[in-house]
């Protein structure tokens, strides 16, 4: 009698696994979210961000008024942090497919793939410079505001950024 329930439980387990279909694999290493990256949270000071990252953040370019960019000295090539009044406001990912979001989205992914990963949480807008083919795919947070913005050429992701409002939606960075 004991073997029947065991067989039944094994069959139920196998059926449940099959019904779930293929599962998305969790990305290895630090991931970009609407809250931050690699321990750095939007709103942290530069000193807090360096401590969280375990790396020095070096200035990139001249900056514009109270806005500038920094990049990690040793790790996470292709990531730039926007700094407003001494705090981390957003991050930009450019020229690397090694940095991924918490769903696994990255540069080079198809626009349709990103839309599928964030199904029900996106809004698509025409890109200011490359539209109507190019788009912004905005990933919305629970408050309905953008947290991640993917820039596409209409087919593939060419860059993306994540951060707080309103900075994450600034098209030209600090300009």
Image (spheres, rainbow, N blue to C red):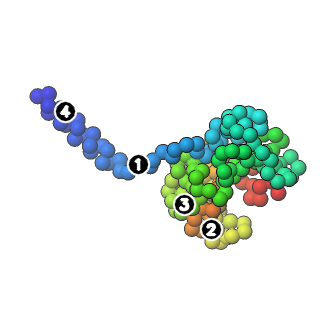
Give the mark nearer the N terminus: 1 vs 3. 1
Residue plotted at (14% across, 28% down): 2
Q: Is residue 64 visible?
A: yes
- Foreground label between 4 and 3: 3
SS state under label 4: helix
SS state under label 3: loop
Disc assigned to residue 153: 2
Disc assigned to residue 6: 4
Q: Quadrant of the C terminus?
A: bottom right
Q: Distance of mark 4 from mark 3, alpha carbons?
A: 44 Å
* The residue positioned farthest toward the front in the image shown: 74
SS state under label 2: loop
Give the mark nearer the N terminus: 4 vs 3. 4
Q: Is 113 located above or below residue 121 in the figure?
A: below
Q: Are marks 2 and 1 in contact (CB under 8 Å)?
A: no
Give coordinates of residue 75: x percent, y percent: 66, 45
Q: Is residue 142 left or right of residue 50?
A: left
Residue plotted at (77% across, 34% down): 47
Residue plotted at (72% across, 45% down): 73
Q: Nearer the viewer, residue 169 or 53?
A: 53
Disc assigned to residue 31: none
Q: Distance of mark 1 from mark 4, alpha carbons?
A: 26 Å
* The residue positioned farthest toward the left in the image shown: 1
Give the mark nearer the N terminus: 2 vs 4. 4
Residue at numbered disc 3: 109
Q: Are marks 2 and 3 in contact (CB under 8 Å)?
A: no
Give the mark nearer the N terminus: 1 vs 4. 4
Q: Nearer the viewer, residue 168 or 88?
A: 88
Quarter location, residue 138: bottom right
Give the mark nearer the N terminus: 2 vs 1. 1
Residue at numbered disc 1: 23
């Amino acid at each position: 009698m004991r073997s029947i329930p065991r067989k039944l439980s094994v069959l139920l387990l196998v059926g449940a696994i099959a019904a779930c279909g293929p599962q998305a694999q969790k990305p290895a290493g630090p991931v970009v979210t609407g809250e931050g990256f690699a321990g750095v949270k939007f709103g942290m000071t530069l000193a807090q961000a360096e401590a969280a990252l375990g790396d020095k953040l070096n200035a990139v370019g001249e900056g514009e008024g109270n806005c500038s960019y920094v990049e990690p000295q040793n790790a996470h090539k292709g990531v730039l942090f926007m700094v407003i009044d001494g705090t981390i406001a957003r991050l930009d990912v450019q020229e690397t497919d090694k940095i991924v979001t918490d769903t696994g989205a990255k540069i080079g992914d198809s626009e349709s793939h990103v839309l599928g990963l964030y199904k029900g949480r996106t809004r698509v807008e025409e890109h200011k410079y490359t539209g109507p083919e190019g788009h912004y795919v905005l990933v919305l947070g629970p408050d309905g505001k953008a947290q991640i913005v993917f820039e596409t050429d209409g087919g593939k992701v060419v860059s993306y950024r994540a951060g707080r409002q309103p900075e994450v939606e600034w098209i030209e960075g600090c300009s």
